[in-house]
């Protein structure tokens, strides 16, 4: 069997780590011994997330920041440098849902793009500069099957996730010689706050195999991060057995 990558002591930044897939990922990383940094826009949500995730052999720290802003991302990476001494892995989970572009105010859909797409690129750039200097690292982007199914009502959201997909697949070729791995996880329907349905409806959808728990996606993220140094999970798609595709 190939030697797997241990997460013990790894310095990991998780964007969007206060809810949904991001929070589930932070929790599993800490359990695996990683030293995790995450951030959120609201103090109560951040406090709740840190309390929930702090239950393993690793550690978790957090701060208030907005991934859509240059100042926010700069502050997060400054904190990574100060508290963890750098970064080994970046996991981008931060994302907002959206309505069709013609049903949103311009500032609103622009903010979704700044959060989902620009925030991802900005985080990746800062991580790459640090990883290149230290000799390698791993970038993992959480995308979406929305890029494939193109469901009605998801035009803005699908555009941001398609941008991440194209960015990652191209970036992988650009940084391969720097010993930096690039992976994309494409979830289908997942029970997160982004879903516009009640908790009871989510639980029923899970029972009917039409929706996944966030932890199931987080488990796949850890699978990708722990492969051997020679292997790279380029694209991995996970969806409920009965996935709505339109």
Image: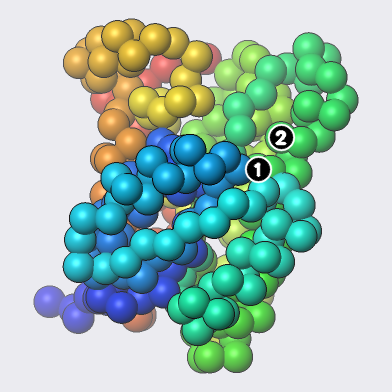
Which disc number belongs to residue 232? Answer: none
Which disc number belongs to residue 116? Answer: 1
Residue at the location (25% across, 75% down)?
A: 8
Q: Are marks 2 and 1 in contact (CB under 8 Å)?
A: yes
Q: Quadrant of the N terminus?
A: bottom left
| Position in image of residue 94 (x %, y %) | 56, 45
Q: Quote the CA–CA distance across marks 2 and 1.
A: 6 Å
Q: Quick one: 37 or 2, which is closer to the camera?
A: 37
Disc 1: CA contacts within 10 A as few (<14), some (14-19) or many (>=20): many
Q: Quadrant of residue 202?
A: top left
| Position in image of residue 120 (x %, y %) | 64, 54
Residue at the location (47% across, 20% down)?
A: 195
In the rendered image, the residue lying farthest to the right is 106
Q: Is residue 162 visible?
A: no
> SS class of the residue under badge 2?
helix
Residue at the location (35% across, 80% down)?
A: 230
Residue at the location (20% across, 61% down)?
A: 56
Q: Quadrant of residue 106?
A: top right
> SS class of the residue under badge 1?
helix
| Position in image of residue 133 (x %, y %) | 60, 91
In the rendered image, the residue lying farthest to the left is 1
Disc 2: CA contacts within 10 A as few (<14), some (14-19) or many (>=20): many
Q: Quadrant of residue 224?
A: bottom left
Q: Is residue 2 visible?
A: yes
Identify the colour scheme used: rainbow
Q: Is residue 173 left or right of residue 90?
A: right
Looking at the rendered structure, the number of numbered marks drawn on it comes to 2
Residue pointed to by mark 2: 112
* Figure check: 163 above or below 104: below
* Figure check: 105 above or below 77: above
| Position in image of residue 107 (x %, y %) | 85, 29
């Amino acid at each position: 069997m190939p030697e797997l990558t241990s997460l013990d002591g790894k310095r990991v930044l998780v964007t969007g780590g206060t809810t949904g897939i991001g929070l589930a990922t932070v929790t599993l990383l800490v359990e695996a011994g990683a030293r995790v940094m995450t951030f959120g826009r609201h103090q109560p949500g951040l406090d709740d997330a840190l309390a929930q995730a702090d239950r393993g052999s690793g550690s978790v720290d957090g701060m208030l920041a907005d991934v859509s802003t240059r100042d926010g991302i700069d502050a997060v990476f400054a904190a990574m440098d100060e508290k963890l001494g750098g970064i080994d892995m970046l996991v981008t989970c931060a994302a907002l849902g959206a309505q069709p572009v013609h049903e949103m105010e311009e500032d609103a859909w622009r903010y979704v793009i700044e959060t989902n797409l620009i925030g991802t690129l900005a985080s990746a750039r800062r991580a790459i500069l640090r990883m290149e200097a230290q000799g390698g690292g791993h970038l993992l982007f959480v995308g979406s099957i929305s890029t494939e199914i193109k469901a009605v009502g998801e035009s803005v959201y699908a555009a941001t996730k398609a941008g991440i997909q194209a960015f990652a697949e191209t970036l992988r070729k650009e940084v391969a010689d720097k010993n930096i791995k690039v992976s994309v996880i494409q979830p289908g329907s997942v029970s997160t706050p982004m879903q516009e349905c009640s908790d009871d409806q989510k639980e029923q959808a899970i029972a009917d195999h039409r929706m996944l728990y966030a932890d199931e996606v987080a488990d796949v993220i850890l699978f990708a991060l722990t492969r051997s140094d020679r292997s790279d999970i380029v694209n991995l798609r996970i969806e409920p057995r009965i996935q709505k595709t339109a």
